[in-house]
Image: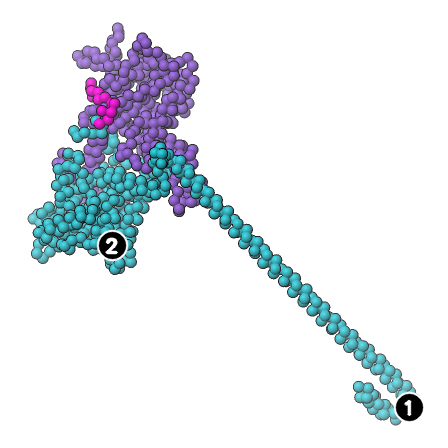
């Protein structure tokens, strides 16, 4: 491993000799090795591992657990495909959080799944978003308390919700009142990714129409779902994210059973009229969701949560209590009096 | 793989679950790295050493570029720190490099306070970061980190031992910054002397309890090379920006009449080792140590100094806010008291001034009255005088008319003979009736 940076040195020195730098007025001649910091950083992050916290919200029967299992190709969520005979539908929204450690390609990830059984299941669903909102804020509060300690841990355990998958019922008509209320209230404290669940109940045309209607409704209600337009870093980001925003909400199908199709084993749902292939982009948009969520925007989800949602919570919290700005003798004018 | 934190957590209630296929989160390090690359990196080096030890030249050699600046004079009255920031780019990595030089270090006659400006500078950078971190609306993400990540301490190549100034300065700095001691201008020492010198230096550092930066040996991929390098500390370096032709290539070297010292030849000096350790292997670790160890220590001390505690005497966790509130109220109370005092003083002064002015006014009135009286007296006197003069004038007029009347009568009675006599008499009465 120690040889790798050096061999890259030889390869790159030929390409780099004579690189000019930007401001500062100094010209580089010959290779220094600054770009090895990428390798150093990569090694460091692989050593410490990652955590990721994902929350699923939607009323029961929309296939939330199945979808998460399909996304992470493992039994991270206990399937509640049918309520066990003596398990009752919870009277209020419960928050259940389960953690698993998964490893792939030398990268270890602690995945925490936060389930919200009981959401939208009662007759009167007033304020059923409150336990969820409280939970999210509690995680921010926990992090804030750790951060504010005098002696801090080297790595503050991160339980903040990085991503909230909101499952929309495939009615084919429009969003429900509950959907709009929930997303409106929570889109400013957590990254919300709306998903159309059980998309195999709609034909392709119905699906397109439904998506358009949903998107328009989201826009009219002023709901900023992830990726938020205002946090696009640069033009490249913006164009990438624009494409994604155009295609959202993704209409997905989940499954953890495999079937033989055209000689290949694929994940799918077998019906009398054929097999719905989960990873087939013609059948549903699962693959797109997975690529977007895991393969390209995983880190960004965490960063937006940390740099924006958490900071907003912190600023609000500190403003309530008159500020945390330390008083020093020279500071009499500036402290929040 | 070495036991990672995640694996440890696995024992704390998170099961390890096998994956049934390729999910794709192994691209996570790449995502993270890409984001960091877009954001750019920053690295801050502090060079401490006496003037003339080749600090600027070494920086130029390390980064293969000519930083601006001319050699400093030796007559500085105190130690100041000069920092310059440069933006370097290599392939797609942008680095904001800040080089801080100590100007005038070791030049004074009395060097007792030399280390103070350096310590103040380092603390100021920590303070700036701490202030930013404690703000309500903060932008830590885009904050330009000026905290010193590495301190290259230049030791003069005497060949004997460390100077006391060096020991004192390093002792003061070792808890604040990662110190990497290097022997400057090491082409002045022969190989055998060098080995002895290095041993002497290391033993002096150990016996004085100076904690220099140890290259990390916990990551197995770099453990080996780092531990060998640790044994080569302090590095004996030679810096040069001039190129000399050796064989058929141009190398950086210093040419003497008796031979050429090649900078990048490992037999001649440890420059390559320094570059390898500082930049190519441990740059990220230096940054991390600065943040997690030195900065946290500073922060803890500073907050404790201000009176914040984590737990109160009953060992219940003290909220930072509560302590803050209490302090704030205390402070506000003090401020108010001061304000009251100042107000009182002000009112008093005003009263005094008023009294003074009233006095002055009274005096003026009195003066005016006096003058008026004087004036009236004078006037009266003058009027009397005038009256007397008027009386005299009237009397004279009367006499004059009487005399003229007499004269007319005399003229009518007498003749011309008396004219002369009258003339005389005319004149005489004038003279007689003086």
Is B342 or B235 nearer to us in this picture?
B342
Output the letter for the chain in cyan: B
Q: Is residue B107 magenta?
A: no
Looking at this view, is A236 or A97 the one in front?
A: A97
Quadrant of the rendered image containing residue B258:
bottom left
Q: Which residues are the magenta region? A: B8-22
**Which label belongs to residue B105?**
2
Q: Earlier in the sequence, mark 2 or mark 1?
A: 2
**Do circles 2 and 1 both sit on a common chain?**
yes
- Report x, y in % for residue B113: 28, 54
Horizontal side of A112 relative to B199 (left or right) equals right
Q: Is residue A136 visible?
A: yes
Image quadrant of residue A250?
top left
Q: Residue at x 43, y 44 (%)?
A: A333
Which numbered circle lies on residue B414? 1
The residue positioned 31% from the left and 27% from the top of the image is A159
Q: Position of residue A223 (x, y in %)?
A: 39, 24
Q: Quadrant of the N terminus of chain A?
A: top left
Left or right, A178 with reference to B183: right
Q: Which chain is purple?
A: A
Image quadrant in which the C terminus of chain A is located? top left
Q: Please give the name of the residue rendered at 29% of the width and 56% of the height, measured from the top-left corner.
A: B78
Q: Are marks 2 and 1 in contact (CB under 8 Å)?
A: no
10 Å neighbourhood of mark 1: few (<14), some, or many (≥20)?
A: few
B123 over B417 or under it: above or below: above
Relative height, residue B104 to residue B17 (above, below)? below
């Amino acid at each position: 491993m120690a040889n790798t940076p050096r061999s890259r040195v030889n390869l790159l020195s030929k390409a780099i000799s004579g690189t000019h730098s930007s401001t500062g007025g100094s010209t580089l001649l010959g290779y220094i090795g600054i770009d090895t910091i990428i390798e150093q950083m990569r090694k460091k992050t692989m050593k410490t591992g990652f955590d990721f916290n994902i929350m699923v919200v939607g009323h029961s029967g929309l296939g939330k657990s199945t979808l998460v299992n399909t996304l992470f190709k493992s039994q991270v969520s206990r399937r509640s495909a049918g309520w066990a005979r003596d398990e009752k539908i919870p009277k209020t929204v419960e928050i259940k959080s389960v953690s698993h450690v998964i490893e792939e390609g030398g990268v270890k990830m602690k995945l925490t799944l936060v389930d919200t059984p009981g959401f939208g299941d009662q007759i009167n669903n007033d304020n059923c978003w409150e336990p969820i909102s409280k939970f999210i804020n509690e995680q921010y509060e926990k992090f804030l308390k750790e951060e504010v300690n005098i002696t801090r841990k080297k790595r503050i355990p991160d339980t903040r919700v990085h991503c909230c998958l909101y499952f929309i019922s495939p009615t084919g008509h429009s969003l429900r009142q509950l959907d709009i209320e929930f997303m409106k209230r929570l889109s400013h404290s957590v990254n919300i990714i709306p998903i159309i669940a059980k998309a195999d109940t709609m034909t392709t045309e119905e699906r397109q129409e439904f998506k358009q209607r949903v998107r328009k409704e989201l826009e009219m209600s002023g709901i900023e779902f992830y990726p938020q337009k205002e946090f696009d870093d640069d033009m490249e980001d913006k164009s990438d994210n624009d494409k994604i925003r155009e295609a959202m909400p993704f209409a997905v199908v989940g499954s953890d059973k495999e079937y033989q199709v055209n000689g290949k084993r694929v994940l799918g749902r077998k019906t009398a009229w054929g097999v719905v292939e989960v990873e087939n982009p013609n059948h549903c948009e699962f693959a797109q969701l997975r690529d977007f969520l895991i393969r390209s925007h995983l880190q960004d989800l965490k960063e937006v949560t940390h740099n924006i949602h958490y900071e907003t919570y912190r600023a609000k919290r500190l403003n309530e209590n008159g500020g945390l700005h330390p008083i020093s003798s020279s500071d009499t004018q500036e402290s929040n009096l | 793989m070495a036991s990672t934190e995640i694996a440890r957590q696995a024992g704390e209630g998170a099961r390890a679950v096998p994956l049934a296929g390729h999910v794709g989160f192994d691209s996570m390090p790449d995502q993270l790295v890409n984001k960091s690359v877009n954001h750019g990196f920053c690295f801050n080096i502090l060079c401490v050493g006496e003037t003339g030890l080749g600090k600027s030249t070494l920086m130029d050699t390390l980064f293969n570029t000519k930083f601006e600046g001319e050699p400093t004079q030796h007559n500085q009255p105190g130690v100041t720190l000069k920092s310059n920031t440069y933006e370097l780019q290599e392939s797609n990595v942008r680095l904001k490099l800040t080089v801080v030089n100590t100007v005038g270090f070791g030049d004074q006659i009395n060097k007792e306070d030399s280390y103070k400006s350096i310590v103040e500078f380092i603390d100021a950078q920590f303070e700036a970061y701490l202030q930013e971190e404690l703000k309500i609306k903060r932008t830590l993400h885009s904050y330009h980190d000026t905290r010193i990540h590495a301190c290259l301490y230049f030791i003069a190549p005497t060949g004997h031992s460390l100077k006391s100034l060096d020991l004192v300065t390093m002792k003061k700095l070792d808890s604040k910054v990662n110190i990497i001691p290097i022997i400057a201008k090491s082409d002045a020492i022969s190989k055998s002397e060098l080995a002895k010198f290095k041993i002497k230096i290391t033993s002096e550092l150990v016996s004085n309890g100076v904690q220099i930066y140890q290259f990390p040996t916990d990551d197995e991929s770099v453990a080996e090379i780092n531990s060998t390098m640790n044994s080569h500390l302090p590095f004996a370096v030679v810096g040069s920006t001039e190129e000399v032709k050796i064989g058929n290539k141009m190398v950086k070297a210093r040419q003497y009449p008796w031979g050429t010292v090649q900078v990048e030849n490992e037999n001649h000096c440890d420059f390559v080792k320094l570059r390898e350790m500082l930049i190519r292997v441990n740059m990220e670790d230096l940054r991390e140590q600065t943040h997690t160890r030195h900065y946290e220590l500073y922060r803890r001390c500073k907050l404790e100094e201000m009176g914040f505690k984590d737990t109160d005497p009953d060992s219940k966790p003290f909220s930072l806010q509560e302590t803050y509130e209490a302090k704030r109220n205390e402070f506000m109370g003090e401020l108010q008291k001061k304000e009251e005092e100042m107000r009182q003083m002000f009112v008093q002064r005003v009263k005094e001034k008023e009294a003074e002015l009233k006095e002055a006014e009274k005096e003026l009135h009195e003066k005016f009255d006096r003058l008026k009286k004087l004036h009236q007296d004078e006037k009266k006197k003058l009027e009397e005088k005038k009256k007397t003069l008027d009386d005299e004038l009237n009397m004279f007029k009367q006499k004059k008319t009487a005399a003229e009347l007499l004269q007319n009568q005399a003229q009518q009675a007498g003749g011309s003979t008396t004219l002369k006599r009258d003339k005389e008499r005319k004149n005489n009465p004038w003279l007689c009736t003086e």
